[in-house]
Amino acid sequence: MKNTFGTAVSVTLFGESHGSEIGAVLDGLAPGLPVDEDFIRHQLSLRRPHGKISTARVEADEFRIVSGVFEGHTTGTPLCIIIPNTNTRSGDYSKGLPRPGHADYTAECKYHGFQDYRGGGHFSGRLTAALVAVGAIAISALRRNGITIGTHISSLAGIPDRPFEDIEADLETLDDLLFPVLSTRAGEAMQAAIEQAAAEGDSVGGVLETAVTGLPAGVGEPWFDTVEGVLAHALFGIPAIKGVEFGDGFGFSELRGSEANDPLRVVGGKVVTSTNRNGGINGGITNGMPLLFRCAVKPTPSIFRDQESVDLSTMKNDILSLKGRHDPAIIHRARVVVDSVTAITLCDLLATRFGTDFPV
């Protein structure tokens, strides 16, 4: 029963959607890192529901740092953040009929009926708030070392955003957007598609595209702890992520080697590539170019349409009519979760490469 990820820098996640509190422990950070609680609040606000395109369950996310921070800086010991759950309606959930697309049935198989099923329990996206809280500290540490992370909605319900162009400028633009797109027109069309799906009792998914600038070359291990492998491991821990690709990803299957290779050259005394189809990684190791990857986010499985299920107490087929408060799309809220998990993972990779005092 493992809920911890990472080697040199690790994160442990705990709590349930309708339990009293959720939280995370971040261990392995160097001592002396500034901890900006206002920035943590800002990051949590990017994940919080807003308007018609999100769930009506809105939590205040009034977090408490209970260890690992003293006088505004990390101590180097395990850092624990706890967030209360205050806006729950457990009566909306029934253990009898597992919800299609959720972990209800698989949790029953693994935990033999002892799991907390309310609101998805330990499998709920609610727990990502804790990841965002500790991820904010990792993001701040990376920024102090010139490493910047940002994510936009590359597509939603088949509606495309424009791709990254001037990556550093685009990342700055995305910083404070509640709906993270690079094209205002695309964003309006996407939000209309979400509202339409909600009106029909349905949901939509999409693709998130992430860029990381400022990473030094030489980070990552060959074979089994490649940058792609470690990041994918962490990213697949985020609920609803069903695909991860780096650089051109599956697009490489349609190219020749002469098109797929990124030519090397020297610019200003630094080795760079003239294209970046490989997304800043060769042989599982960073090459100094921007790290680029995409995550497929499935439609929210909680929909207000009758769905086929089974009554586990009688082992007979049944129909599920969902109750509760649910998102018609989670992709816009998931972007800050992707940023946070990416930051934690990169801190781990960097500490593995340079020692646990990096980043400082």
Image: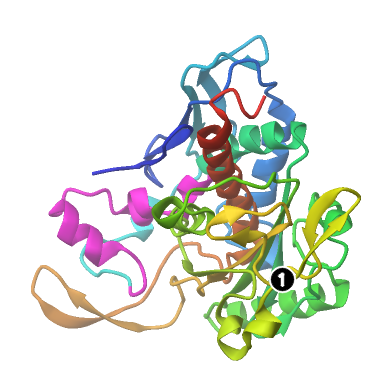
Q: Quadrant of the N terminus?
A: top left
**Residue shown at 63% from the left, 88% from the top:** 256
**Residue shown at 23% from the left, 64% from the top:** 106
Residue 156: x and y, percent?
66, 77
- Between 310 and 149, the residue placed more toward the observer is 149
Residue 321: x and y, percent?
36, 76
Q: Quadrant of the C terminus?
A: top right
320 in relation to 3, above or below: below
**Residue shown at 51% from the left, 75% from the top:** 299
Residue 3: x and y, percent?
34, 42
Question: To which quarter of the image does residue 33 belong?
Answer: top right
Find disc 1 in the rendering and name its residue: 262
Identify the coloring: rainbow
- Label the magenta part by its dominant secondary structure: helix
Count of labels in the image: 1
Residue 59 visible to an observer of this rendering: no
- Between 120 and 70, the residue placed more toward the observer is 70
**Residue shown at 53% from the left, 53% from the top:** 227
Magenta span: 100-129
329 in relation to 82, above or below: below
19 in relation to 324, above or below: above
Disc 1 marks a residue whose amino acid type is Asp
Residue 182: x and y, percent?
83, 67
Q: Is residue 15 magenta?
A: no
Which structural element holds mark 1? loop
26 in relation to 73, above or below: below
Residue 296 visible to an observer of this rendering: yes
